[in-house]
Image (tube, rainbow, N blue to C red):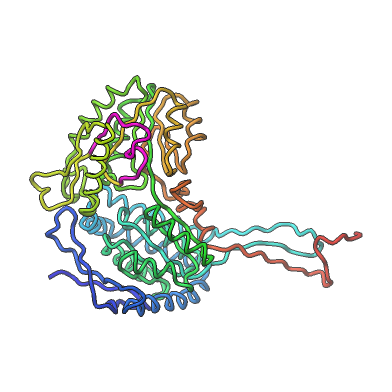
């Protein structure tokens, strides 16, 4: 008998007012039902009671949590990191069951959340303001950071713990409360994370967990007048719609959206290292990363030899259940993701590209009941082909030939996204040119397009984001407002910017 799970609203676990639930199944073996989770309905129906209760509770939670000293809030987050460290393997195994990526990767997902917790805990003693000289005598001038209120946190499936931790830990550390709408594809990890935060001492009303569809629960939170801030990771299309609402309602908004990331390989690069990088960057997490390598730009002199080696490596990758020790590539998250990859392979063929390997659903022993797609390499791709410009979010790699670094930089920069990029070269001049000229929020030299670290800002430009960053020190500025204070102890009226005869 499978477990039936609940939302966490107003300090208690409770069933959805709608009475409806959705299934959470293992994408590597759809016969395995992980659990039934709340299908919170739209605000116009029974779901409205849940959403209103969550917002009201988050407002109460904000009043209590924001008054706790920041170092004490940091201690709660440090405790959450300790609990995740103790339970790392169990959390990772459940994560693999519900979203598919191999156990080694889900352990890394948990570790990233642990790192983020410990970093956030330290920031509890570093929410710096500034003290500056006043232009007047006997007057003190300073700025400091203040929390904002309840934040709607809307997260994707591909990093069920790491991405929520990037948003939730900084938001909480700054004194805000949280209403979290996780992806419907990874609800078990969301429940686990919420339980860990509560166990670590977070006041119950500082966090609300509301399951359901983005077009109902997510939209209701975005539209709600008592939710002053939103952090969203997902598609550019959805992010743009959220941006319109947030702009109209004057909400604080952070968007982390799509990517079409390129790895550039120069003829002077270490070919073995570049090959390892593209295999990991393109096919890790079955290509389901916003930073995944979806374009491989090869200098013409090395193109044929590199493609031959790439094809052999890609064809040898072992697909299967992420819990099996021999698996290198797990399943895709659901049938629609597989179908999208199939459509783009056909688009590539129609535009004249060649499928060097893969290009179809994976079948065979152990794969019959899962959503598997073969690692795919497309050659003969033109820089303007749709597979070279549009995000696929799967294990489909487009190979593009170039003649010079100038051309490679131009190809990289022409797409609408600007998240991550990589350059493999032994020439330090090329490396620093790439760092400066590639139009991305992140550039790696002699490393793949994936691999962000928790203590540095993460995010992109153009269609990838709206200027804010996750991770590192910058995210704490997003979750706070700057307030300026003046203290005049002169005992007389002093007027700034008015000429005074000293």
Front residue of 129/396: it is 396
**Vertical side of 441 occupied by 434: above or below:** above
Q: In the rendering, at what x and y percent does residue 473 appear?
A: 51, 53
Residue 384 among magenta residues: yes
Residue 418, by quadrant, is: top left
In the visual, does 366 lie left or right of 454? left
Q: Quadrant of the N terminus?
A: bottom left
Total marks in image: 0
User: Would you identify the image quadrant in which residue 40 lies?
Assistant: bottom left
Q: Is residue 42 above or below residue 451?
A: below
Hey, which residue is sitting farthest left in the picture? 365
Residue at 38% in and 62% down: 154
The residues colored magenta run: 376-392
Q: Quadrant of the C terminus?
A: bottom right
Q: Work out which residue is located at the far right of the displayed protein and give it.
A: 501
Does residue 66 belong to the magenta stretch? Answer: no
Rendered residue at 27%/32% (across/down): 353
Residue drawn at the location 42% of the way across and 53% of the way down: 256
Of the pair 439 and 317, the residue shown nearer to us:
439
Q: Viewed as shown, does residue 228 lie left or right of 378?
A: right
- Where residue 398 appears, x then y in whole percent? 30, 35
- Picture coordinates of residue 351, whole percent (x, y): 28, 34
- The answer to whether 116 appears left or right of 132 in the picture is left
Residue 489 x/y as whole percent: 78, 70
Which one is in front, 409 or 35? 409
């Amino acid at each position: 008998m499978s477990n039936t799970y609940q939302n966490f609203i107003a300090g208690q676990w409770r069933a959805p007012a709608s009475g409806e639930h959705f299934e959470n199944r293992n994408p590597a073996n759809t016969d395995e039902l992980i659990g039934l989770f709340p299908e919170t309905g739209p605000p116009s129906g029974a779901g409205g009671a849940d959403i209103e209760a969550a917002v009201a509770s988050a407002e109460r939670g904000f009043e209590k949590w924001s008054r706790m000293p920041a170092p004490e809030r940091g201690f709660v987050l440090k405790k959450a990191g300790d609990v995740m460290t103790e339970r790392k393997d169990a959390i990772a195994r459940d994560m693999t069951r519900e979203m598919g990526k191999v156990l080694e990767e889900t352990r890394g997902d948990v570790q990233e959340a642990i790192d983020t917790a410990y970093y956030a805990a330290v920031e509890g003693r570093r929410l710096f303001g500034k003290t500056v000289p006043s232009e007047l005598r006997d007057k003190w001038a300073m700025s400091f950071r203040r929390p904002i209120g309840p934040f709607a946190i809307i997260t994707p499936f591909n990093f069920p713990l790491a991405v929520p931790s990037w948003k939730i830990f900084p938001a909480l550390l700054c004194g805000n409360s949280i209403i979290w709408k996780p992806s419907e594809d990874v609800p078990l990890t969301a429940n686990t994370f919420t339980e860990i935060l509560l166990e670590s001492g977070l006041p119950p009303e500082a966090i609300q967990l509301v399951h359901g569809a983005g077009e109902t629960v997510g939209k209701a939170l975005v539209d709600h007048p008592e939710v002053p801030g939103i952090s969203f990771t997902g598609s550019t299309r959805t992010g743009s719609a959220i941006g319109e609402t947030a702009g109209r309602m004057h909400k604080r908004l952070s968007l982390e959206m799509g990517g079409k990331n390129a790895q550039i390989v120069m003829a002077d690069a270490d070919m073995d290292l570049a090959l390892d990088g593209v295999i990991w960057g393109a096919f890790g997490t079955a290509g389901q990363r916003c930073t995944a390598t979806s374009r491989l730009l090869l200098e013409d002199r090395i193109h044929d030899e590199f493609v031959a080696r790439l094809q052999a490596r890609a064809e040898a990758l072992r697909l299967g259940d992420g819990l099996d020790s021999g698996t290198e590539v797990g399943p895709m998250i659901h049938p629609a993701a597989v179908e999208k990859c199939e459509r783009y392979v056909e688009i590539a063929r129609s535009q004249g590209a060649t499928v060097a390997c893969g290009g179809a659903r994976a079948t065979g022993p152990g794969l019959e009941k899962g959503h598997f797609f073969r690692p795919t390499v497309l050659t003969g791709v033109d820089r303007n082909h749709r597979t070279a410009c549009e995000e696929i979010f799967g294990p489909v790699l487009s190979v593009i030939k170039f003649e010079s670094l100038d051309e490679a930089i131009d190809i990289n920069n022409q797409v609408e996204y600007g998240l991550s990029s990589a350059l493999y070269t032994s020439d330090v001049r090329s490396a620093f040119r790439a760092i400066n000229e590639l139009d991305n929020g992140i550039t790696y030299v002699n490393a793949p397009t994936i691999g962000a670290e928790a203590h540095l800002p993460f995010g992109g430009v153009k269609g990838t984001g709206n200027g804010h960053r996750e991770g590192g020190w910058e995210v704490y500025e997003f979750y706070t407002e700057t307030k300026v204070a003046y203290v005049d102890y002169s005992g007389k009226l002093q007027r700034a910017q008015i000429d005074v005869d000293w």
